[in-house]
Image (cartoon, rainbow, N blue to C red):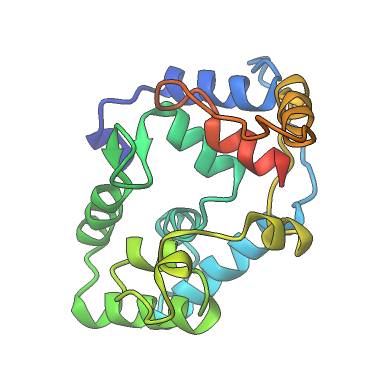
Amino acid sequence: SVLNDYPMQIDEFQDAAEHITGQAFQSDNRYEIFPFSYRMEAIMKHAREIAQVLHAKTLGTEHVLLSLLADRGTLASQVMEFAGFAFTEQDKGVPIASLRKNLEDKAGWDKNDIKAIRSLYRAQNPNRQTMGNMMGMPPSTSGGLEDYTRDLTEMARAGQLEPVIGRDAEISRMIQILSRKTKNKPVLGGEAGVGKTALALGLA
């Protein structure tokens, strides 16, 4: 019900998923069960921990959505970004912070609940300052680089990034440019949602 408050339609999320994964959506009333990826297991684990600190009796979609919003490195986050949500102030679209606040209000969480969630996130992700700021946490004092950036290479090394599908040509071109002796700085341009972040994740 939270996502219903925004102008994005289900077709837009479907188009975004097809664009990012390179796979067409087929509605034939058949369901397949796929094993969770390492990243999805981490998302669900964090969602369960959110439910626990809130003393919830069951794991709800609100806990899973909040867990997804705290990690921009997932395919789900890329789909939301492509569909029109903005993860940073520089991006165009509906701010993710607005979606998070709406989720908190509709779930009926009070200030103590929100404080418990943020404390949980801060304890588990002491170096993830960008998402920490999005969740309302104060910036670190270790410098601007750590406050406003993420080490995608380290995240990839730790298996925290989902694979990027269907962008091999662009990623190969980026690698080719980076391999030059001069003029070796690839520039990713385009409107919000065309997949610039996906290319950076794929390169990592």
x and y percentages locating residue 20 in the rendered image:
62, 26
Q: Residue at x 61, y 60 (%)?
A: 151
Tell me if 142 is positioned left or right of 26 in this view: left
Tell me if 96 is positioned left or right of 129 in this view: left
x and y percentages locating residue 192 in the rendered image:
40, 27
Q: Quadrant of the N terminus?
A: top left
Tell me if 175 is positioned left or right of 39 in this view: right
x and y percentages locating residue 129 in the rendered image:
44, 69
Residue 80 visible in image = yes
Q: Residue at x 28, y 55 (%)?
A: 103
- Return the residue nearer the eye: 135 or 46: 135
Number of on-image labels: 0
In this rendering, the answer to whether 121 lies above or below 171 is: below
In this rendering, the answer to whether 126 lies above or below 71 is: below
Q: Quadrant of residue 164?
A: top right
Q: Quadrant of residue 44?
A: bottom right
- Return the residue nearer the eye: 124 or 46: 124
Q: Quadrant of residue 124?
A: bottom right
Q: Residue at x 78, y 42 (%)?
A: 34
Tell me if 48 is positioned left or right of 36 in this view: left
- Return the residue nearer the eye: 3 or 181: 181
- Return the residue nearer the eye: 154 or 38: 154
